Amino acid sequence: MVDLTQARPFLDAIFGNAAAGEFLLLWTLPDRRSAWFADVDAACAALAAPSYENKDVYAGMCTSPADMGASRRCDAANVASMGCLWADIDVGSGGHKKENYPATIEDAMEVLKTYPKPSMVISTGHGIHVYWLFRERFLTARPADNAAAAELAERWQRWLLRGMQSKGWSLDMTWDLARILRVPGTMNWKDKAHPLPVALLENNNTQYDWLELSKRIPADIHAEAHTTATKASGIGALKLSEDRVLNGDVFNALQLRFRQKFTDSFQRTKPLAGGDQSPSAYDASLAMYGVIAGLDDQQIADLLIMSRRNAAQDLKLRQDYYANTISSARREAKKSESIEDLINQSKSTPEAQEALNISPEEARARMLDSLSTVLGVHVDRIVKYDVDPDPMFWMEVGGSRRVKIGTVDIIMELRKFKNKVMATVGALLPDFKRPEWEKIAQLIVNCAETAEGIVDGKFEDSTKSLVNEYLLATKIGDDANEAAALGMPFADKEGKVFIALESLKQWIYYTRHQDIKLQDLAQFLANIGCVTKQMRFSMRASGKQVSRRVWQVPSDLVPGNG
């Protein structure tokens, strides 16, 4: 059993300050299964279950913006926030591919004395995991921030590597933001014949400002890797100095194309829309002109520096500021392009799609991709249920999260739609002008799939196919007592198959998004020939006998009998 006296302090230290809407990952071997939790309490409740015994248990170092499902982990470019820096230090020669590691934990800790004091130290059985906790989390949702966090994590570990190399030792690079490390209070099953405890050796609650830690890294320690996040943002290292100048021909082309509006933004003399006259607002305006005109990142940075210098304003020569400004402009431009793309796709007729050899499924997939870009959340599927009195819409987001949108009235109201998404997945959608949102709302309806198995809103018409699908999707047990304890279908000695009404109701809710009343579902089952029976079962955990009502399924509905 997982020792929560060690696991909880560890998880609290790293994830206790995570924002609402972020999810922490527990990942296990050998089943390679992901489990996502909205808070530490939920994670600890899961760890207390027998299902985590005799497994290697890992935690993701960064949070995810969504529950990614049981078969996925959040990739580095999409993590929500980072709460610490870490290092995985192998010791000894057993269980490692390399041999040039510190001989003991004490040897490794001796090297770390020349660095900021670690907040936590975990013994993994074959080494230690070391953590430096942040006072406030490093938010990584924006591409430029993601790249900065990855750069900090890499530079930190390369600084540690320098200390290890001074002793002739090595350190594996584990700085990627998608990294998972072992949870204390569990076991290391790498050698199944000789499992070793993963133990919390030290937890002193020391917290650091991540910016202060970054300043401790020597200036000649550089990040050498090119992260996915950096590529995604399109912002590399910019040349920033007070004498930067944009090519004259390029500047003149901008003036000719955008005329007085560009000149006003460059000179910073007239208020922008809404009366904003802040330096950052002028920067954002100029960056957008640069993006629309096809300038590269360095040219846009040069344009901003020129404008600030001419207006005698602080040049703000920081990589993060210019990278964030340019990235934001590119995202806004991309959003506008995606809206236009969606509008163009909505005008595409089935005949035009057929002529271009585009299947209806591919056309819908393209619309969903564009819709995802516009909304800023990954939309996997939109489902429409033709029920009385008005059709209902559900949206599947981020691999596993289902958002119950409701009727068309909700879709048409941007504020209500945003509230639905925010309440379910914790993502705040961007604002849109009314004409833009009306077009997006029309496309949300257009790319919705009508749920299979629902006929004219009458659920009983599809009960037979649903029962058959339910039995295909769930295991029919041969131990009635065990199956009854779990609410699963089972077969008796004569081969008759029985199901529990409550479990079928729950399955329908999660697969069809329909919340059917138990009495209605019971009537539907009776209509297709199911017969209710009162049976007694023995609960092994308590040894008690219980009486429960189950439903016998007609043999022609049992998979393999038709």
Image: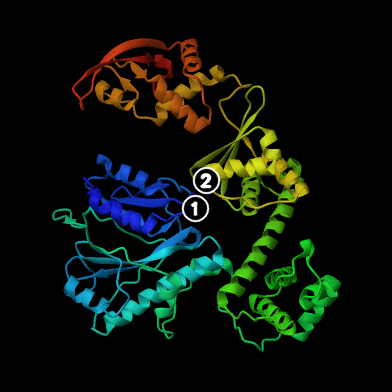
The residue drawn where x is 40% and y is 74% is 213
Query: Which disc is residue 22 wearing?
Result: none
Total numbered circles: 2
Residue count near mark 1 (Cα–Cα under 10 Å), binned few <14, some 14–19, many ≥20: many
Horizontal relation, residue 509 to residue 304: left or right? left
Which residue in the structure is indicated by mark 1?
A: 65
Give the colour scheme shown: rainbow
- Residues 225 and 470: in front is 225
Q: Nearer the viewer, residue 224 or 321?
A: 321
Q: Amino acid at mark 2?
A: Val
Residue at 42 percent of width and 56 percent of height? 17
* Residue shown at the point (39%, 23%) measured from the top left: 560
Query: Is 258 drawn above or below residue 512 in the view shown?
Result: below
Residue 161 percent location from the top left of the image: 32, 78
Residue contact at pointers 2 and 1, CB within 8 angstroms: yes
The answer to whether residue 99 is visible is no
Q: Amino acid at mark 1?
A: Pro
Q: Position of residue 35 (x, y in %)?
A: 38, 46
Residue 14: give x, y in percent of width and height.
Answer: 36, 58
Element on which disc 2 rests? helix
Provide the residue designation for mark 2.
425
Indicate the quadrant where residue 484 lies: top left
Q: Is residue 86 something that shows in the picture?
A: yes
Residue 247's x, y, as percent?
74, 85
Question: Local crowd at mark 2 within 10 Å, few (<14), some, or many (≥20)?
Answer: many
**How far apart are the two marked residues, 2 and 1, measured between alpha carbons?**
8 Å
Q: Residue at x 60, y 69 (%)?
A: 324
State the SS at label 1: loop
Picture quadrant of residue 46: top left
In the displayed structure image, the side of residue 449 where residue 353 appears, left or right: right
Q: Earlier in the sequence, mark 2 or mark 1?
A: 1
In the picture as drawn, the residue positioned furthest to the left comes out as 194
